[in-house]
């Protein structure tokens, strides 16, 4: 069956690394994600310049030795704000994906374990949520609840719930028919315990991959909401907000739009590649083919 | 046979599956998987249920173990009605009846170590200390011919026959009276089949187990069963001592089943 001759965790990780290393996309995704996290962590204790130090005489400077990525309309250092903006993006996306997975996975697992009416109710509610275009509805939610980082987290989080509920239900349903789950039932285990001990561990890799991809989408959504002025509020730094401020200055200081845009693009690309790479890596079918 | 000797009693068991609706407002059609099935199994006895696929024999096994709810009928295990039992009572009853599945690759959770898998019924059904649990794991692994150290390995490190031994060890750990074996050897190579069947027979002697063998393989049945029940389309069509049924089958379906067994060198006959 498996080529993992030995099964100590260390050996499993070594095996993953050996195979993952072969994929340039996976390595790039992993590198970008690691860099993003590192930059965000560093910005918590150090940025090249204070993020809200206004310096009107030096505003809209192109990149220089002092300001590596230039300065914005108020003379604030773009690099410092990008670094701090990474924290903002990660925090919003992390909590939003956390809400999605934290509610979606139990709902999906419940639907698969209970079947019948419970399943119908959960899944129809899912379809209802899915039927709305996510970003448009997030705009609506933040418009109703008022703009702000917290509300944008809620808005993005809500639309992550059905994604995880569907994935969890679908993957769980096939597991419930497997003999080892029947064996657990014969052993006298209840549905909740079987879900925790057998179902969730066996779909964990699937969920991790989905989380990576949803994380990328959440970063994009957060940037979109902030760009529209519905997300993170000034003066807190946010990539979407920086793009918004830059758009009127496109001809005067194009670097103000280019760098936040690049940051968003590279981050989302990196996370997507990481997700794709993880999927290839964790898919047992691919492992067996080898 | 007297009442005390009866381990399992199945009375008029009927089970319908609902099929997909053909028309929106018509009641969904039903398929009768079990039709008025009755049987008794004495302590220490080995009973085989044979029939082709779709005859309802696996459904019967699952219903006896309360994995499916019957439409009508009663299952009495150790004198207690399985479907009238409260969840707590049912859990107690489960200690007396365990199951071995067909596919030793699918019946063991790939993410758990053998020791965990084997101890699963014990964890769910009994309260035992760590030391006793380890002792019980070692005991059952020993009784199926595996090593105590195998408890720390994963299922994929074992061959098909060894995995089926692990599954048998799991079924034994609560010291049950009844083992339901659903095609337990049909996924194994012939030589491994013989080993596992011998193991079943040895365990029967040493532990006083009763068996309900679900099988389509008549050669296997002849080797292990005292009595045979032949099922077709959810109904019992013939029942009797193994040698009597095999030697002088009364029902035409049984004769057809027996005639379908391939024989080396013998004349070819048409399959069922």
Image (cartoon, coloured by chain):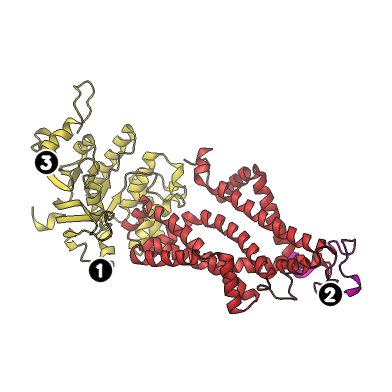
Chain colours: A red, B yellow
Q: Residues within 10 Å of mark 2 (few under 14, many from 20)?
A: few
x and y percentages locating residue B110 in the rendered image:
45, 49
Decide: marks 2, 3 in contact (CB < 8 A)?
no
Q: Which residue is disc 3 drawn over?
A: B241
Chain letter belonging to callout 2? A
Q: Residue at (54%, 49%) from the top-left corner?
A: A282
> SS class of the residue under badge 1?
loop
Q: Quadrant of residue A67?
A: bottom right
Q: Which residue is mark 1?
A: B86
Mark 3 and 1 residues: CB-CB less than 8 Å, in contact?
no
In the rendered view, does B5 fall on the left or right side of A231? left
Measured Cα–Cα span from mark 2 to mark 3: 95 Å
Q: Which residue is mark 2?
A: A53
| Magenta residues, start to end | A41-69
Q: Considering depth in this image, is B40 or B135 the residue closer to the camera?
A: B40
- Neighbor class of circle 3 (other Cα within 10 Å; few <14, some 14-19, many 20+) is some
**A151 falls in the magenta region:** no
């Amino acid at each position: 069956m498996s080529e993992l001759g030995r099964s100590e965790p260390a050996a499993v990780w070594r095996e993953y690394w050996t195979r993952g290393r072969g994929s340039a996309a996976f390595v790039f995704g992993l590198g970008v994600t690691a860099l993003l996290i590192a930059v965000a962590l560093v910005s918590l204790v150090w940025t090249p310049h204070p993020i809200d130090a206004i310096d009107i005489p030096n505003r809209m400077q192109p990149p220089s030795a002092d300001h590596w990525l230039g300065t914005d309309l108020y003379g604030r250092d773009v690099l410092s704000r990008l670094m701090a903006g990474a924290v903002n993006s990660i925090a919003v996306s992390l909590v939003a994906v956390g809400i999605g997975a934290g509610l979606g996975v139990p709902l999906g697992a419940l639907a698969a374990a209970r079947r019948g009416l419970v399943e119908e109710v959960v899944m129809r509610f899912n379809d209802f949520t899915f039927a709305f275009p996510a970003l448009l509805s997030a705009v609506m939610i933040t418009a109703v609840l008022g703009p702000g980082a917290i509300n944008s987290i809620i808005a993005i989080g809500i639309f992550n719930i059905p994604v995880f509920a569907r994935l969890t239900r679908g993957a769980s349903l096939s597991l419930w028919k497997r003999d080892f789950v029947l064996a657990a039932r014969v052993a006298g285990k209840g549905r909740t315990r079987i879900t925790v001990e057998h179902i969730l561990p066996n779909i964990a890799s699937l969920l991790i991959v989905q989380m990576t991809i949803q994380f990328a989408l959440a970063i994009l959504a957060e940037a979109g909401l902030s760009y529209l002025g519905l997300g993170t509020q000034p003066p807190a730094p946010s990539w979407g907000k920086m793009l918004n401020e830059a758009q009127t200055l496109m001809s005067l200081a194009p670097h103000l739009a280019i760098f936040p845009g690049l940051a968003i693009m590279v981050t989302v690309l990196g996370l997507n590649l990481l997700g794709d790479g993880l999927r290839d890596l964790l898919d047992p079918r691919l492992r067996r083919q080898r | 046979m007297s009442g005390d000797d009866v381990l399992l009693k199945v009375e008029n068991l009927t089970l319908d599956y609902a099929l997909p609706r053909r028309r929106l407002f018509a009641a969904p059609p039903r398929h009768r998987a079990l039709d008025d099935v009755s049987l008794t199994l004495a302590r220490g006895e080995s009973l085989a249920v044979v029939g082709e696929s779709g005859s309802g024999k696996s459904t019967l096994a699952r219903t006896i173990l309360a994995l499916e709810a019957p439409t009508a009928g009663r299952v009495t295990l150790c004198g207690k009605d399985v479907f009238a039992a409260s969840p707590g009572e049912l859990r107690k009853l489960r200690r007396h009846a365990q199951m071995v599945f067909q596919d030793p690759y699918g019946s063991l959770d790939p993410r758990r170590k053998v020791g965990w898998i084997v101890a699963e019924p014990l964890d769910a059904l009994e309260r035992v200390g760590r030391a006793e649990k380890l002792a019980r794991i070692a005991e059952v692994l020993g009784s199926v011919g595996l090593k105590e150290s195998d408890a720390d390995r994963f299922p994929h490190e074992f061959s098909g026959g060894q995995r089926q031994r692990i599954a048998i060890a799991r079924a034994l750990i609560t010291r049950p009276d009844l083992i339901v074996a659903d095609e337990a050897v049909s996924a194994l190579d012939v030589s491994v089949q013989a080993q596992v069947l011998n193991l079943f027979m040895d365990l029967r002697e040493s532990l006083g187990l009763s068996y309900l063998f679900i099988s389509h393989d008549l050669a296997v049945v002849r080797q292990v069963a005292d009595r045979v029940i032949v099922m077709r389309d959810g109904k019992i069509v013939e029942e009797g001592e193994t040698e009597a049924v095999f030697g002088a089958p009364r029902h035409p379906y049984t004769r057809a089943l027996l005639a379908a067994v391939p024989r080396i060198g013998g004349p070819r006959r048409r399959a069922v």
